[in-house]
């Protein structure tokens, strides 16, 4: 066999392996990694790799599109998780410019999130009024659908540490609800449904599915800590409108990522630790784990019929989704399709036909045909694993997959520090026996160890194949050194042509995760609030004043550049004060701030918005409350004198 033919076949089987592999990353995944053959790497050093993946030459289509001219608007919005900062990032794409951070789970000093009464009500408080949680770990971000595309209503983001789900209104770009999931720890993947499983007239999001990653004893009261057989994970369904938990499914193993079908009938989670191990070493002994498929209509029928349990103080119905309880396809609520051990990532193709599950410890991606999974539930498919139509080798450490709408998938290879472009139909042909089918189309080096990937409109029926963004967990030599904590690297790649072209690097604070990218015309953000949005709005400056009821005092004031309606107000030491501020300005982008020195108070009010804070006036003296958000030529003079009498 000629050398050229050998290399061609190796490339088709995903055998490319870069010699420059981060040793720490390899060591972390070395236990249980399924091997794959090597071929000589095109680059042998970080410098060579960087050169090979250098941005396109000036004047090319990609570079001209990414580096926008002054005043030029981006084509897409991107919604990003922000990791440990507990908020959602809003980016313009393809420039990668950060436009906004939406605080969700942790306080934010800029806008007063966690300071105002309104934000505390969303975040949740202890009996003493302090915030219930001060930390978060956001991972996954997704938005609501209609007709297979984003509809601009909502986006959701999870907090893995405290098992919380936050909803963001995309008209005002604010978090308006947070739900705590019962019976769950390590809440990881999320995905909204895209249609109702029964009623075709409901072609929009009504549910959000949540994967509980860490198995815990149920109920988790300390009694069964040393009984691994009592440990289970739960898959949760949350109502998209009320944000109340509808139901949960008890499963074997751990949930990881989540996906939903376009017809609404199936949700899925890739699953690891089918061994139910409680130690690191125990979680990788099985050669295959599973991708679980949830039959939504059957689950909701079971709940309606009362076939469920509850755990502890939670009243949420929990149905049996264990392997043992779902062997009969005619009654099963859950289907367990086997995939290589410890998979990571499950993604729905834009043609609505397939879910792709990445191997992580196996160099493969598994393509599962949804119609065949439904056939199994209907008793028409004898072996559930016959729904696997391809399982092909891509490279080392496949994690997540994006799509271009032209039949191609783009998968990150963590250990190879690459993105591989491959054709799904060709992979299916190769798996079926056609060894001449060339499914690997292209590869590109990224810097370094990529995790999440997504493309423009990738997770909709309208994937347009313009750009992908890649979140790299290590940046190493890509940016100026700033001490031991390096920024991570988000890279933008043009995929509009046959070859992928790296067009931008962006340093980001640790540790962002997932994101979605969609056309800007799908959103219609509001620039000014409706005054009636708040029941406590002060609609006229004449309503301002200090209103006392014993030791409880309400201070009402308005802002209108460049002055507050009250030039001063007087309190007594020990008063419990609720201060209400309405911004009466109607001009777009005319936001005011309000800060009180020594009282730990700072928040903003956007045009026509109302917010309130409650505090104890425990420090006597004069305190200049001032506007913190530049609003007018006389901004520095915009203040009010708070006098606290001793």
Image (cartoon, rainbow, N blue to C red):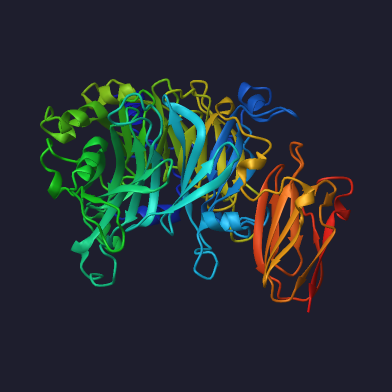
The spot of residue 431 in percent (x, y) is 24, 27
Tell me the residue at 30%/43% (across/down).
270
The spot of residue 633 in percent (x, y) is 89, 45
Q: Is residue 301 left or right of 347 when viewed as pictured?
A: left
The quadrant of the rendering that contains the C terminus is bottom right
Tell me the residue at 47%/35% (across/down).
454
Tell me the residue at 61%/55% (across/down).
113
The spot of residue 143 in percent (x, y) is 47, 37
Nearer to us in this view, 388 or 87? 87
Nearer to us in this view, 95 or 493? 95
Q: Residue furthest bottom?
A: 646
Q: Is residue 15 something that shows in the picture?
A: no
- Image height of 303 relative to 206, above or below: below
The quadrant of the rendering that contains the N terminus is top left
Nearer to us in this view, 488 or 256? 256
Tell me the residue at 75%/60% (across/down).
595
The spot of residue 311 in percent (x, y) is 26, 60
Count numbered badges in the picture. Answer: 0
Q: Is residue 253 left or right of 423 when viewed as pictured?
A: left
């Amino acid at each position: 066999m000629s050398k050229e033919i050998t290399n061609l076949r190796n490339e088709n089987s995903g055998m490319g392996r870069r010699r420059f592999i981060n040793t720490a990353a390899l060591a972390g995944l070395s236990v249980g990694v399924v091997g794959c053959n090597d071929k000589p790497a095109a680059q042998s050093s970080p410098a060579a790799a960087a050169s090979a993946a250098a941005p396109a030459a000036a004047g090319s289509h990609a570079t001209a599109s990414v580096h926008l001219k002054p005043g030029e608007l981006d084509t897409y919005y991107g919604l990003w998780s922000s990791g440990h900062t507990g908020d959602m990032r809003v980016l313009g794409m393809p420039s990668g410019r950060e436009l906004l951070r939406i605080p969700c789970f942790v306080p934010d000093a800029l806008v007063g999130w966690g300071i105002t009464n309104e934000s505390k009500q969303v975040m949740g408080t202890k009996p003493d009024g302090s915030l219930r949680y001060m930390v978060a770990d956001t991972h996954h971000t997704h938005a609501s659908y209609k007709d297979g595309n984003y509809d601009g209503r909502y986006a959701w983001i999870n907090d893995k540490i405290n098992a919380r789900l936050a909803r963001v209104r995309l008209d005002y770009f604010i978090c308006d609800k947070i739900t705590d999931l019962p019976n769950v720890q390590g809440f990881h993947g999320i995905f909204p449904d895209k249609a109702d499983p029964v009623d075709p007239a409901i072609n929009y999001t009504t549910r959000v599915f949540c994967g509980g990653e860490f198995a815990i004893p149920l109920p988790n009261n300390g009694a069964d800590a040393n009984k691994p057989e009592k440990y289970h994970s739960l898959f949760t369904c949350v109502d998209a409108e009320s944000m109340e938990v509808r139901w949960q499914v008890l499963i074997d193993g751990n949930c990881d990522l989540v996906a939903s079908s376009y017809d609404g009938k199936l949700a899925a989670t890739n699953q690891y630790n089918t061994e139910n191990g409680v130690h690191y070493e125990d979680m990788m002994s099985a050669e295959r784990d599973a991708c679980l498929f949830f039959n939504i209509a059957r689950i909701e029928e079971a709940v309606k019929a009362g076939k469920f349990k509850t755990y502890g103080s939670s009243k949420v119905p929990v149905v049996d989704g264990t392997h043992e309880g779902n062997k009969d396809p005619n009654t099963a609520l859950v289907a367990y399709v086997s995939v290589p051990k410890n998979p990571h990532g499950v993604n729905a193709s834009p043609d609505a036909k397939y879910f792709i599950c990445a191997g992580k410890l196996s160099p493969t991606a598994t393509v599962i045909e949804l119609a065949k999974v439904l056939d199994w539930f209907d008793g028409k498919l004898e072996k559930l694993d016959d729904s696997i139509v391809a399982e092909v080798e891509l490279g080392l450490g496949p994690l997540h997959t994006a799509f271009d709408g032209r039949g191609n998938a783009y998968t990150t290879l963590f250990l190879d520090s690459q993105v591989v472009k491959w054709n799904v139909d060709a992979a299916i042909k190769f798996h079926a026996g056609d060894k001449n089918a060339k499914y690997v189309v292209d590869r590109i080096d990224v810097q370094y160890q990529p995790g999440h990937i997504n493309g423009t409109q990738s997770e909709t029926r309208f994937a347009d194949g313009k750009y992908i963004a890649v979140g790299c967990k290590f940046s190493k030599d890509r940016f100026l050194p700033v001490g031991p904590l390096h920024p991570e690297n988000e890279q933008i790649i043009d995929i509009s042509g046959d070859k992928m072209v790296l067009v931008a690097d962006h340093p980001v604070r640790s540790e962002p995760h997932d994101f979605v990218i969609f056309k800007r015309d799908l959103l219609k953000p509001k620039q000014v609030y409706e005054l009636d949005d708040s029941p406590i709005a002060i609609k006229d400056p004449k309503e301002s004043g200090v209103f006392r009821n014993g030791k409880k005092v309400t201070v009402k004031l308005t802002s209108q550049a460049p002055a507050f309606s009250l030039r001063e107000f007087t309190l007594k030491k020990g008063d419990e004060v609720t201060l209400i501020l309405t911004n009466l300005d109607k001009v777009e982008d005319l936001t005011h701030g309000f800060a009180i020195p020594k009282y730990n108070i700072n928040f903003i009010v956007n045009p026509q918005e109302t917010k309130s804070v409650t505090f104890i006036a425990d420090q006597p003296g004069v305190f200049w409350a001032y506007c913190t958000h530049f609003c007018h030529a006389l901004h520095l003079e915009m203040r009010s004198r708070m006098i606290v009498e001793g």
